[in-house]
Each structure stands twice: as C-alpha cells, then as structure tokens.
Image: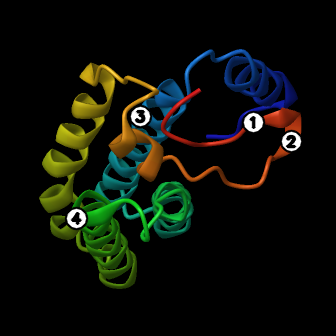
Amino acid sequence: MTYGPGAAAYTQTQVATTASQQKLIVMAYDGILRFLNQALDHMERNEVEAKHERLTKARALIQELASTLNMEEGGEIARNLWNLYVFFMQKITEANLTNDPEPVRGILPAIRELRDAWAELKIDEADETVKALDRRVPQGEGGVRLSVTG
C-alpha cells in the first residue's frame, strides 16, 4: 500500500498540531501496531518484500521511542522500557529473517498494553519522574519533537 503526498501532508499537519507530546507517543505505538498487523497480513500472503517494509517501519518507530529515554535520570522505568524496546526489536528482526509470524504475535499484547497505558496516563509536567523521562530529542521537520511532555 502506497500513500501519496496528500497523506504525508496530512500526517505532518496532524503531528505538528498535536498539543501533547504524550499523544505523539501514543501515535507512535499506534503506528507500530498498524505496521506489525500489516506485516502479519503480508506474511500470510507470502509477500516478503511488503512484510519486510512494514517490519522495518515498526522497528524504526520502536527505535525512536527508545531514543527518547533518559537513562541517567529515568531510573528503573527507563531501564525497563529500554529492555522492552530491545526485546521488541529482536523479535521483529527474528520474524523478518525467518518469515515466522509467531515472534510478532508474541509481542503484540505487550505493545498494546504499553500503548493503552500511555493513552490513559495523566501527566503532571511538574512531576520529577516525568521530567526524568522527558529527554527532548533534536527537533525534526516541522518543529516536531517526541517526548513525554508538551
């Protein structure tokens, strides 16, 4: 499935106008879940190239989430998230190399749980734990940053 320039412009506008960085994180999880489910569909149809593309996109989003962690100040929460992200990336790589859907199926529930936890999280921007997890990454196109707080 190919998206034209209109879809890309829509996505950029949606991201640029998102008031909460928390929403960006939830959007990243939504993308991961979407790409993983698409990859499973491609595996069932033995569409190896399309499967590879979707798994690569899911892995890149997980890498982006991992890059936002502040390991020095985030403490146990950041370390646990880091370990989960590494595990997810290993399972995605395994599925990509073996064309076996089981590694992806095995991580989907945990990713959904993390996504739902972020969606339900009530963030107090003054909270020291939140500040510790909120390491801003370099600003990308359109002034967008992925972090925990706005």
Q: Secondary structure at mark 1?
A: loop
Query: Mark 3: which secondary structure?
Result: helix
Residue at left offset 31%, top offset 32%: 118
- Residue 55 x %, y %: 46, 62
Query: Residue 53 falls in which quadrant of the image?
Result: bottom right
**Is 19 on the left or on the right of 45, as rendered?**
right
The Cα atoms of the two marked residues, 4 and 2, are separated by: 32 Å
Mark nearer the N terminus (4 vs 3): 3
Report which residue position mark 3 lands on: 30
Vertically, is 55 above or below 94?
Answer: above
**Decide: marks 1, 2 in contact (CB < 8 A)?**
yes
Looking at the image, is mark 4 or mark 2 nearer the viewer?
A: 4
Q: Residue 36 location, x and y as percent?
A: 36, 51
| Dot label at residue 76 | 4
Q: Which mark is residue 144?
A: 1
Question: Element under label 2?
Answer: helix
Q: What kind of residue is marked 2?
A: Glu
Q: Nearer the viewer, mark 3 or mark 2?
A: 2
Q: Give the residue at mark 2.
A: 141
